[in-house]
Amino acid sequence: MRISFHLRQHGWAYVFIAPALVFYSVFVLGPLAKTVQISFYEWDGITAATAVGLDNYVRAVSDVQIIESLGHSLVFFFFYALLPIVIGLLFTGVFARTQIRGLTFFRAILFLPQILSTVVVAVAWRWIYDLDGPLNALLELVGLGDYSRAWLGDFSTALPSVGLIGTWVMYGLCMVLFIAGIQKIPREIYEAARMDGAGMFREFMTVTLPGIRGEIMFAMIFTVTVALRNFDIVWNTTSGGPGDSTKVPSIFIYQAAFITRDIGLSAAIGVLLTLLILSVTGIIIATMRERD
Amino acid sequence: MIEHPREKWLAYGILIVGTVVALYPFLSILSLALSEPGERPSGFTIPTALNFDNFVTAWTDGHFATALTSSAIVCIAVVVGTIVLAIPASYALANARGPVLTLIGVVMLLGLVMPYEAMIVPLYNMFKDWNLLNTWVALILPQIGLSLSLSILWLRSAFSSTPPSLAEAASIDGATRMRTMVSIILPITMPAVMTLATLLFLFTWNEFLLALVLIPDNANTQTAPLALSFFAGNRRTNDPAVMAAAAVLVALPVLVADLFFQRKFVSGMMSGGVKE
C-alpha cells in the first residue's frame, strides 16, 4: 500500500534515473565488483584462473617493493598536498588584509597548471630537469654548476624532483581557493578582530582559518587523492625509475595488469588503493566538518 | 578598511611571483619549440626569430592531426552523452524523495573519489570481449559512466536551487514532468549546464590512464595526450625541441578553451567541491 503510494508519487523519478544508473552500473560499479572478484584469484589473463583466497592481499602487503612504493606515496603526499596547502595558507594571511585588483587575471594564470594535460606538464618538466635544461643552466649561472645533474635520472633526486612537479601543479589551485574563501568572510569580522587588538597571527588563527574551512577541506581531499594515485606524472617522467625509486602503487597496478600479467595481484593492489583513498577522504571529512 | 601600502605591495609581489612560477614551464617549452631545429638553447635565452620547423616535424611525425581529431570526437561524445544522461537523473534526485532514491544518490557519488586504477583490468577485458579495444567507443563509454558522479552532484544542486513555484505552475498548466524539465527548468539552469560541460571537456581532454589501457596500439584512434606520451617516450624522436613543440600542440586547444571559458573553469572547479 505504502509502496504503491510512493511509486505513484515518485515513480517518474526512477524512470528518469534509470538510464544514468544503468550506465553507471555497467561501466563503474560492475568493473569495481569485478576487480574485487579478480583479487581473490591467481590469473595471467589467458589460462583459467585459480581461486587463491586472500593470497594476493598477503603478497601485496608483504612485498617490500610495494611497501616502499607506499613510502613514495607518503613523500608525494608531502609534495602534492601538504606543501601546496601550507604555501596557500601562508600567503592567504597576507591577502586577508588587502583588496586585490585584477584577481581574475591572476586566477587564470595560477590555474594554468591544473588545466594543462599531465602529459604536457611531464614533458615540460622533463626539459626543465634535463641535463641541458634551464635548471642546470641556472645553477651554472650562479656558480653552483657542480650540483647540476640529470635530476630525474639520479637516484637521490628523482623522487623529490617528481614531487616538486606536484607542488607546482597544486599550489595555484590552493592559493586561488583560499583567496576566494577569504573574500566571502565579512569584512566586519576582521574589523572587530583588529579593534580587539589582534595581530596578523591571531587574526589568521581566529578569523581566516575557520572562515575558509570548507575550502581547506576541498583542497585536502583533491590534493590527497591525486597524491595517492599519481599515475600520469610518474609514468610520463620516470616510469617509476631510476630503479624503483619513484614507483607508486598505481604504477604497480598497471605493470602487474599489463606487463607482468599478475592480474590478481594488480586487482588486490587496486582494491587496497581504493580503500586507502576512501578512508583518507573519510577521515578528512570527519575531522574537518563543522561541529555544531 | 585601512590598508597598509606595504601589505598591498607584498600581496601583489606574491601574486606576481606565483604567476611567473606558474607560467615558466610552459613558456620554457614554448621558447624551446620555437628555436632553430638542432640548436639547443640553454634554457634562459629568448629565441631571436620565430621558427616553426619543430612544429612541422612534430605535427607530421607524431600524427597529431589524427590524435587531435580523436580527442575532439571523444570529448564531444563524452560531454554530450554525460549531460544527456545526467540531466534527467539529477532532476529526479532534486525533486523526488524516498530511501531508495537517497541510496541511489549516495552510490552515484562514489565515483567522485574512485581511482580509475581499480577498474582498468575489468574494463580492458570487457572491451576486449566486445572487440572494441582500440576504438573510440571503448574510451567514450567508461568516461561517461565515470563523469556521471560529478555531473549529478553538480546539476542536482543547480536544479534544487530553482524556485519550486515554477514547476508547480507548469504542472497546474498540465505540463508533464519531462516537459517541465526541458522547457521550464533547463533554460534557467543553462549556465550551470554550460559550466559543467566545460569542466567535463577539460577532464576528458586530459585523461591519460584510460586511453593508455584501452587504446594501446592503434595510432588512428589515440587521443592527443596518449600520442604525446608515445611520441615523447620514443627514443628515436628524442629531440627536446620537437618534443616541446608536440607538447605545445596538445596544450593549445585547452589553452584556447581556457581563454574563452576562463571564468567557468575556475569558478566551476572551485564551487563544485566546496558546495558538497
Image: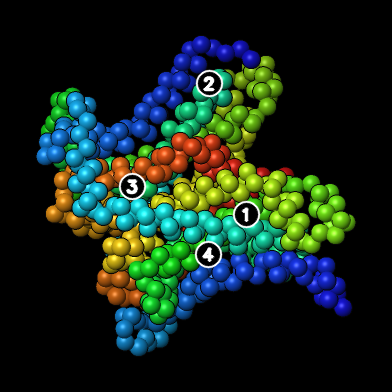
Task: Kindly state the secondary structure of the residue where label 3 is placed.
Answer: helix
Cα separation, mark 3 vs mark 1, equals 30 Å
Give amino acid for label 1. Leu
Question: In the figure, residue A21 lies in which quadrant?
Answer: bottom right
Classify the position of the N terminus of chain B by image quarter.
top right
Q: For the residues marked 4 and 1, what is the alpha-carbon distance in whole angstroms?
A: 14 Å
Q: Which residue is mark 3?
A: B250
What secondary structure is marked by label 1? helix
Question: Gap between marks 2 and 4, in whole Å?
Answer: 41 Å
Asked if the residue under mark 1 is in contact with the one under mark 4, i.e. CB atoms within 8 Å, the reply is no
Disc nearer the start of the sequence (3/1): 1
In the image, A74 versus A215, the foreground residue is A215
Q: CA distance from mark 1 to mark 2?
A: 32 Å
Local packing at callout 4 (Cα closer than 10 Å; few below 14, some 14-19, many 20+) is: many
Discs 2 and 3 carry the same chain letter: no
Query: Callout 3: residue from which chain?
Result: B
Relative to A70, B273 lies left or right? right
The residue that label 4 is drawn on is B145
Q: Give the vertical position of B235 relative to A255 (above or below).
A: above
Question: In 3D space, how far apart are the residues under numbered discs 2 and 3 (Cα atoms)?
Answer: 32 Å
Report the disc number at residue B153.
1
Q: Which residue is mark 2?
A: A101
Q: Residue B137: give its label.
A: none
